[in-house]
Amino acid sequence: MQADLWQQYSAELQKYAVLAKAESKLGVKRKILVLILAGVLVLVVFCGVGISLACNLVGFLPAAYMTVQVMEKNGPELDREMWLTYWVLFGACTVVETFSSWVLYWIPFYYAFKVAFLIWCMHPSWRGAAFVYEQFFLRTAALR
């Protein structure tokens, strides 16, 4: 079971050219690179050093990379719509957080939840941003 998951993990990482470049330049296998980055992220999120920046980078960098990929390859309309929806949600979260950071500071593990939420929103299989958009943004707009 674990070997099967590890093989799926390795196969998934083969899709990303940026990891291949990092692997060749650093001389470290891409699955180890991702595990190191994930470990650093976990430490940052749970220890609080540079946590806001780390959360925003997690929400921005992968999504920006995937958005550029979809736009450059003239990807399917569904993918374009997904990333546009994600960026609307990410922007709304950033604006709300800017004005309420003094309250959010007191919520335990807020940034850990934020990272999990952003990953859920940007993951193509889960399509969390579309769910939030349909359930909250459209319903709020329909009430007016």
Image: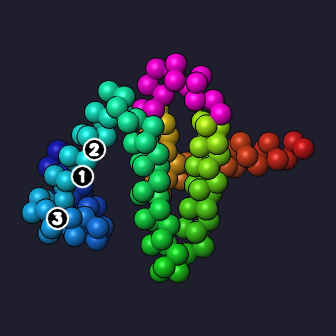
Q: Earlier in the sequence, mark 3 or mark 2?
A: 3
**Outermost residue, right side:** 144
| Horizontal and vertical percent position of residue 67 | 50, 67
Kindly identify which residue carries mark 3: 23
| Horizontal and vertical percent position of residue 75 | 52, 76
Q: Quadrant of residue 2?
A: top left
Image: magenta residue range: 99-112
Q: Does residue 143 lie above or below 71 as drawn?
A: above
Question: In this rendering, would 89 be left or right of 122?
Answer: right
Question: In this rendering, would 20 be left or right of 29?
Answer: right
Question: Do the residues bearing badges 2 and 1 touch, measured as CB atoms within 8 Å?
Answer: yes
Q: Which type of secondary structure does the marked residue at label 3 adopt? A: helix
Mark 2 is on which residue type? Ala
Magenta stretch: dominant SS? helix
Decide which of 88, 77 is in the foreground and name it.
Answer: 88
**Outermost residue, left side:** 27
| Horizontal and vertical percent position of residue 24 | 14, 69
Label 3 environment density (alpha carbons within 10 Å; few <14, some 14–19, many ≥20): some
Kindly identify which residue carries mark 2: 38
Instruction: Compute the Cα span from label 3 to label 2.
Output: 16 Å
* Residue displayed at 47% across by 49% down: 59
Q: Is residue 100 magenta?
A: yes
Mark 1 is on which residue type? Val
Question: In this rendering, would 125 be left or right of 34?
Answer: right
